[in-house]
Amino acid sequence: AGPGWVIIGMVKMLIGSFLAVVALGQNLPAVEAADPTVMYTVAFGFVTNNTQIALALAAFFVIVSQLKINVTNAYAGSIAWSNFFSRLTHNHPGRVVWLVFNVAIALLLMELGAYQAFESMLSLYALVAVSWVSALVADLVINKPLGLSPAHIEFKRAHLYDINPVGVGAMVLASLTGLASYLGLFGEYAQAMSHFIAIACALIVAPVIAFATRGAYYIARSPLIFSDKGQQHACCVCQNHYEPDDIAHCPAYENAICSLCCSLDARCQDMCKKDQEVSHRILEFIQRTFPSLAVEYFNVRLIRFIGVFFLITLITGLVLALVYANSPTMEPAIGSIVQNTLWQVFFIFVIIAGVISWLFVLAHESQIMAQEESQSQTRRLVTEIEAHQQTDAQLQNAKEQAEAANSAKSRYLTGISHELRSPLNTVLGYAQLMEIDQHTPESTRRQASVIKRSGEHLADLIEGLLDISKIEAGRLDIHRNHIHFKNVMTDVSEMFRLQAQEKGLEFFYQCQQCMPAVVLGDEKRLRQILINLLSNSVKFTESGTVSLAVTYRNQVAVFKVSDTGIGVPESELERIFMPFERVRRPGAPAVSGTGLGLAITHLLAGMMGGDIVAQNNSGGGTTFTVSLMLPHAHDPIEKVEPSKKICGYLGPRKSILVVDDDPTHRGMAGDLLTPLGFNVVEARDAEDCLAMVCSFAPDIFLIDSLMPGIDGATLASRLRQQGFVVPILIVSANASEDRLHQNDNPPYDDYLNKPVRLDNLLERIAFHMHITWEYIASDSSAGSAAVTVPAGIPDQQLPSADLCKVIIHYAEIGFLSKLSTIVEDLKTSGGASEQFIALFEQQLAAAHFEPIIEMLQAKAKESDHAVQ
């Protein structure tokens, strides 16, 4: 209905004019006839002859009309105040606030009696209002048909300039022209027609300005066309849903935004039209008009100050003018005094307005700078986040590639280790068989021993590679087995005693007397820890000593490996336990290695419930202290000593069923165990085993873990289901054999890794079958724990007492090369019998020094008694 209400308003004005004519017809003065109360009283006097009733009806009608007018104006004013201040302050407290504010202003003005002054200003306000409306009409009915403005009506603030010179310019010029006419500058006729002159001026000026600017200030940016016009879109700020025509695309949020949120948002600083601020446009105009003056004296800050100062000054002047106009009629002298006083007050307010305007401009610029800095930091953070996301994506891709490569390497190591272990199991098995066979010539047995040691070394290398793979995969397992502590420490110490002597180093081994015979732990990992530490000490020590000390207390074994080598810088004591880190310092010997030994040692110590600490010695070198939890074993497995040759076992004959898909491995097991008195039966796979046990019940099973069809663990489960309670040992050549032990209640009793060592196999068989071994009786068995001088050898066939003391001394420190020299001297000089020299040489070949010491201690003691 919009413009249609103008017609109704015209009818109402005609009726009001008619009532005024009626009031004038009653001989009332013109001033009273224009009063609505008098007007309506006269009108209602024609309805009723009762003057009181007519006056009451007129009063009621006036009150209702004023309430309607005031509430409507208050609501309309609240909309105007809300829109104005929301644009200015980017805040919207709600229209109810402004409604109450307008009502309060109306009541205040009513109490002040300022309505008469406003009546004189309404005509001026009407000039501004009619100029504004006329400018809009000119744009709609003239500019658009002529193509001077865009064909469509754009009302979204996000797409409009803050000030359009067509509308604002036409309204300002029309208002000034109408005001000049109203003040009588163009004569009485122009004064009477001032409003119509303002309308005509706006209708003429608007097309002229549009033609001059070529319509460049209507649309600030091209609107984003939403493809799905039939759907509603959510505002990215308030989350309310609007139709596509009621929203715009915001480049700050990069999403849809409604008109209200666009007006209230203070963060973007009109990012969508940053270069089109009014102050910048005014500055550009001044720079084009006055190029030399503008550069020196004009800037955006000054333009903003002038604008704010002019606005505050104008408001102050209007308020003071309103006060003066509302003042009661006074004498000219008094009026002159009041006028001068108001002018003084005005200029005081001008000074205050200047200060306030400057502070406002500076505060506004500070706010803008803070917002720009915040936005800059935000953009940097967003850029950094995006860069981190890209880096994370690259790292994730690299991680996935590395994991894929590591997985492929692990699969390769798993496969290749199985292929290496299987033939190596055969090589070591037959080498051990040849070594213990008494019918094999001595030279062949020595060659078999070399093959055995080389095979064991190769097996240790394979295990080392697998350890690295398992460490990287995070699935290295620690087993809990019986460890014959003294034997392990003796083997390790003798191994590195020889290596140290070959390098010209002294090796010392100290062991606490009250050590347990058997402890619980992972023997393989314990050996690995000690070998890694002692190997590094020997490698990095050019001269001096290497020592190994062992103490045991409260189930905890403490191993100290000390040397007099180059030492480790204090800054690198922690770093040396990292993978691929090695000691790099001037004077360090060039030794080979991967830098994984200490890393693996540190990891193993932690997994075994212990700790490792490195510290430099005051006199040079380094001491590594390893603490491990090795509880005492109360029911130990009988250890098969290498010095004793097993020839059989006590009790009835036992049957062993060997299940392996490799006939070589089955044959080797038979060759190893049959001479000991076992009845070895072979099965080529699980199906063959299940068929054989229907008519045959073995005393123990030896089952390969990886076979075609049914694997070893599954076969063990089926045997248990069939009621077999005899021991089942799993033999594995798979690098992932640790998967077999993830079950808390496995169907098998024990497992062995290929290549199988004979002494380990016999230990497990004896433990699970509860058998007692029989040994070959031989006084000259190498490494016998209690070797005595054979009967029939006279004392004079032993070396002299002094030489015995020398031999005992060198044997106690493990000086193998010196003892070998003494043997050669005895052969040349004949200082001892051939039988003693042969026995002495045999013990030295096996690096067993305790039998030598026990054999010569009696002779040394006799010499001491003789001296006393």
Image (cartoon, rainbow, N blue to C red):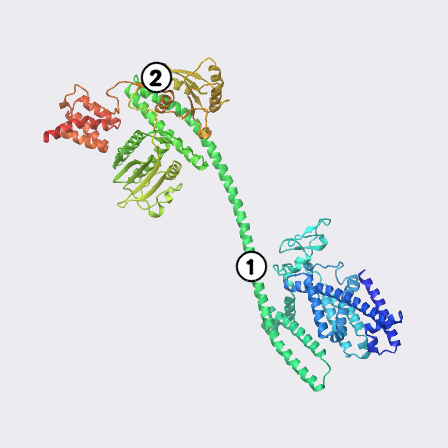
Which quadrant would residue 860 be assigned to in this image? top left
Q: Amino acid at mark 1?
A: Ser
Residue where numbered disc 2 is placed: 676
Task: Estimate the x, y position of residue 644 in percent, counting from the top left.
Answer: 29, 22
Per the rendering, the mark at residue 851 is none
Which quadrant would residue 770 be assigned to in this image? top left
Above or below: residue 539 compared with residue 99: above
Above or below: residue 487 compared with residue 268: above
| Left or right: 813 as drawn, with respect to 45 | left
Residue at image coords 52%, 46%: 392
Task: Estimate the x, y position of residue 249 in percent, counting from the top left.
Answer: 67, 54
Element at label 2: helix
Nearer to us in this view, 446 or 194: 194
Residue where numbered disc 1 is placed: 374
Nearer to us in this view, 650 or 794: 650
Residue 221 visible: no
Task: Estimate the x, y position of residue 152 in percent, counting from the top left.
Answer: 75, 58
Q: Amino acid at mark 2?
A: Leu
Above or below: residue 844 compared with residue 615: above
Task: Estimate the x, y position of residue 648 in percent, counting from the top left.
Answer: 33, 17
Q: Which callout, 2 or 1, points at the residue further toward the start of the chain?
A: 1
Element at label 1: helix
Q: Quadrant of the N terminus?
A: bottom right
- How busy is the neighbourhood of tag 2: few (under 14 within 10 Å), some, or many (20 plus)? some
Residue at image coords 83%, 68%: 57
